[in-house]
Amino acid sequence: MADKPHAIVIGAGFTGCAIAHDLALRGIQATVLERGELASGTSGRTHGLLHSGGRYCVNDQDSAVECIEENILLRKIAKQCIEFNGGFFVALDESDLKYAPDFEQGAQACGIPIEKLALKEALRLEPNLNPKVLAVYSVPDGSFDPLRLALAFAATAKKNGAVFHPYNEVKGLLINGKGGVMGVKVLDRTNDKNYEVRGDIVINATGAWAGDVTRMANASVAVTPTPGVMVAYDRRLINRPINRLNVPGDGDILIPQRRMVCIGTTSFEVTDVDYIPIPDDQVAFMYRSAVELVPAVAETSQRGWWMSARPLVGKGESGRSLARTFKCFDHQETDGISGLVTITGGKATTCRAMAEKTVDVACCKLGISTPCTTKEIPLISYREYYRL
């Protein structure tokens, strides 16, 4: 271990866990620091949609291609975490129908397999779908268990030597005499003790909190924290995700999760990512949107509501207009600060690809030529994280 390069990863969401997995496979010792439990930030608050890319194939085709490519890969390496149920895009009014030709062309351009279904067949497959539906397309969406996906990456990383420290919060960066980053200052929240960790490179995988970390080194990233509200209802009324056939908007995805359905999501911006109130009017809007897609939601009870802060790449635009792709920042190039790399943006579906890009950058900086193999390596059981 002492002879291996040492990477410190800040953040143990989907991306941080996937980065640790990739680092370990390339022979780099990974120390992962997370101020809470694994996936306790944005990753643990997603609605769990395994994106086909259909949502982005018209106006954000780079993100759509990333999603369908990683969708296919995750089905191979993370079978244990995924419900292979497919999905529908449905038209409920003339505006939706008008969008359909663009959707068909975008899906074809991005390599997303779709099929227009007869309405009778769609209603047979999903009897609770709004009977007034005007058009239905099938897509290779799916649903996944967020905690299991993060833990599967973490368990496999741990098996290969990565070390995870939950409830250890990074409070500052260690800066060398040349202004470069050489480690982190940490608060162990389990015993209220402070300590330091030094490494060859620090990887900032904190998502919506990425700007907080880079400011510790007087660096910056173009990221806009964009929360969205989701609501769950206590009956599993559908067996596949139902998307509105239109430009992405609020309340246009209904997803089955275990014995519930979850409607997502709104989009707004905040300045304090650690305190985001959930507006009552958004919860009420989500209910109306869910009932429009599946009227039987009106017969359910609300199970819970929550918020997730997306780390969207870009500044100066509204949340819906920002791309859902990801970007890796080498702060040597962007800010003249060595030893620090930030990854942000993206989707849960693309976390493996985000990790590959980030570790490619880290390896280049460390002089390591070992290629990425995460496309071929199946993840071990998520249960093993707590057994290893």
Image: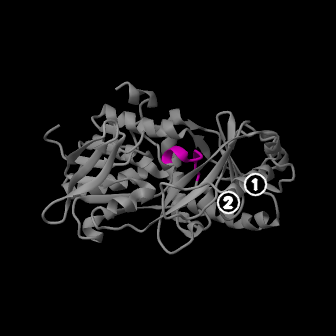
- Residue furthest top in the image: 387
Other-residue count near label 2 (Cα within 10 Å), few / some / many at <14 / 14–19 / ≥20: many
Q: Is residue 135 left or right of residue 161?
A: right
The colour scheme used here is one colour
Q: Is residue 116 magenta?
A: no
Q: Quadrant of residue 282?
A: bottom right
Q: Viewer-proximal residue, 247 or 335?
A: 335
On screen, 384 above or below 12?
Answer: above
Residue at 38% x, 37% y is: 154
- Local secondary structure at mark 1: helix
Check the picture and name the quadrant holding the N terminus.
top left
Name the residue type under label 2: Asp
Image location of residue 318, percent across then percent down = 57, 71
Residue at 57% x, 70% y is: 321
Name the residue type under label 1: Ser
- Residue tagged by mark 1? 289
Labels 2 & 1 near each other (Cβ < 8 A): yes
In this rendering, does residue 251 appear at all?
no
Other-residue count near label 1 (Cα within 10 Å), few / some / many at <14 / 14–19 / ≥20: many
Please report the bounds of the magenta region as a residue range: 43-52
- Residue tagged by mark 2? 250
Residue at 55% x, 56% y is: 276
Q: Viewer-proximal residue, 265 or 348?
A: 265
Q: Viewer-proximal residue, 132 or 36?
A: 36
